[in-house]
Amino acid sequence: MTEYTSWSIIRDETFTLTNEDPEVEPSAGNLVVPTDITITQSNPDSTMYYTTDGSDPTVASGTTYSGAINTFRDITDFKVIANETGWTDSNIVSNPYTWDYFTSILFQSDTYDGDRTLTDLSYNQHATNQAYNSTSVTKWGTTAFYILPYYHYYMSCPHNDDIEFGSGDFTIEGWFWTGSYAYAGTEFWKGHFVFGGSYGAVSWFFSIRGSSGTTVTVQFKYCTTGNTLNKTAFNGVIYQPDGVTKIDCNEWFYLSISRISDKMYLHVNGALQAGLPYDCGTDTIKANASEFGQSKYGPREAQGVYVDDFRIVKGKGLYSADYTTPTAPHEPDDRLDY
C-alpha cells in the first residue's frame, strides 16, 4: 500500500478594501428648477460626506449625507466621498452644476383640451391662474394657450421682480396666432394679445392685435412715471422677412422684443422691423401685477389669440440682427448664461 502525504501552504497577505465611488443624481450639468440631489452607494455600511463650496470633502470637513438635498442656485460645485472605518475612502466624485440666471418665465402648452393650468417651466415656477389650453390651434404640442378673457381665459400672476426690467436688458418672445371672434353676433373683434401691467395700473404692455382687414399690429408702450404710458417703442403693422408681405391673421408667427443697452428691437419671424431700433436711452421700465392675455382697455379687448413657447428673459437682450426662428420649443435647460 502506498501512502500519500498532503501539504498546504499558508500565505500571509494583506488586502486593501476600498469604497466604491458614490453615484450622484442629477449628474453634472445645467439645472433648471430646484431639484433634489440624491447620493447612492452599494455598501450599506458606508457614510457619505459632501461639500457644496468646491472644497474636497473629508470626514472632518464634509456634511454627512442623510437624505435628499434640495438644490438652489448657490450650489455650483457639489463633491462627495464614501467612507467606512477600516476601508480606504472612495474617490471624490465632483458634480459641477450651472444655472440659467436669465429665463424669468417660460410657458409652453402641451396638455388636454380645456385644461385650466399653465406651468412656468423656468427656475422661478411662478404660480398662475385663469389659464385655458385648447386643441383647436396648435404649434408644437397637443394644445396651445388660448386667450379669450371675456370668459376669463387669461393668465395672471402677482407682481414679481422677474418682470421688473428697470433700465436693464430683456427679451420677450414667443409664437402667436391671431384669429377673430364674433361677440354677441354684432361686434367683430379681431385677435388681441396683451402682456404687461394689470388693468387700471399699467406700467408697460406688449400688445398684438389683428387690425382692419387681415393685418397684424404690434405695440410696446411703457411709462417712466406714474401709470401713464408716456413712451411708445413701436406701434404699427408688422411684416414678413421679405419686408413687403404683411403678417395675416390665422397663421403662426414668431415675435421677439429685445432691449440691449439703450436700444429696443422688434423682430418678426426673425426679421428686424423697419425703422428700428428704438432709442430708449436710460429709461426705467417698471412693473406691477402681470396679466397674460388681459387688456388694459377692458376684458373683451384681448381675445381670439393662441400662444405657445412664450419666454421672458431678464438681464439679456438676445436679438439685434436678423436670426432664424426656433425649429423646436425652447428646452427648459437652454443655457442663457453665455
Image: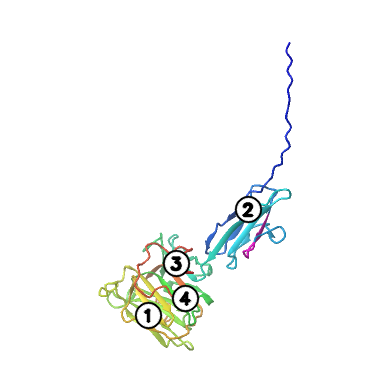
Q: CA distance from mark 1 to mark 4?
A: 16 Å
Label 3 sits on residue? 132
Spot occupied by residue 295 in the image (x, y as percentages of width and height): 42, 78
Which comes before the other along the chain, label 3 or label 4?
3
Tell me if mark 3 has few (under 14), some (14-19) or many (20+) residues whose alpha carbon lies within 10 angstroms of its own: many
Q: Which residues are magenta?
A: 48-55
Tell me if mark 4 has few (under 14), some (14-19) or many (20+) residues whose alpha carbon lies within 10 angstroms of its own: many
Q: Quadrant of the N terminus?
A: top right
Q: CA distance from mark 3 to mark 1?
A: 24 Å
Name the residue type under label 4: Glu
- Magenta span has 118? no
Q: CA distance from mark 2 to mark 3?
A: 51 Å
Which comes before the other along the chain, label 2 or label 4?
2
Name the residue type under label 3: Tyr
Q: Which mark is residue 219?
A: 1
Q: CA distance from mark 2 to mark 1?
A: 58 Å
Name the residue type under label 2: Asn
- Magenta span has 52? yes
Which comes before the other along the chain, label 1 or label 4?
1
Residue closer to the observer: 220 or 138: 220
Please tell me whether mark 2 or mark 3 is closer to you in this view: 2
Disc 3 is placed on an element classified as loop
Spot the residue most to the left: 244
Q: Are marks 3 and 1 in contact (CB under 8 Å)?
A: no
Q: Which mark is residue 291?
A: 4
Q: Is residue 304 left or right of residue 338?
A: left
Tell me if mark 1 has few (under 14), some (14-19) or many (20+) residues whose alpha carbon lies within 10 angstroms of its own: some
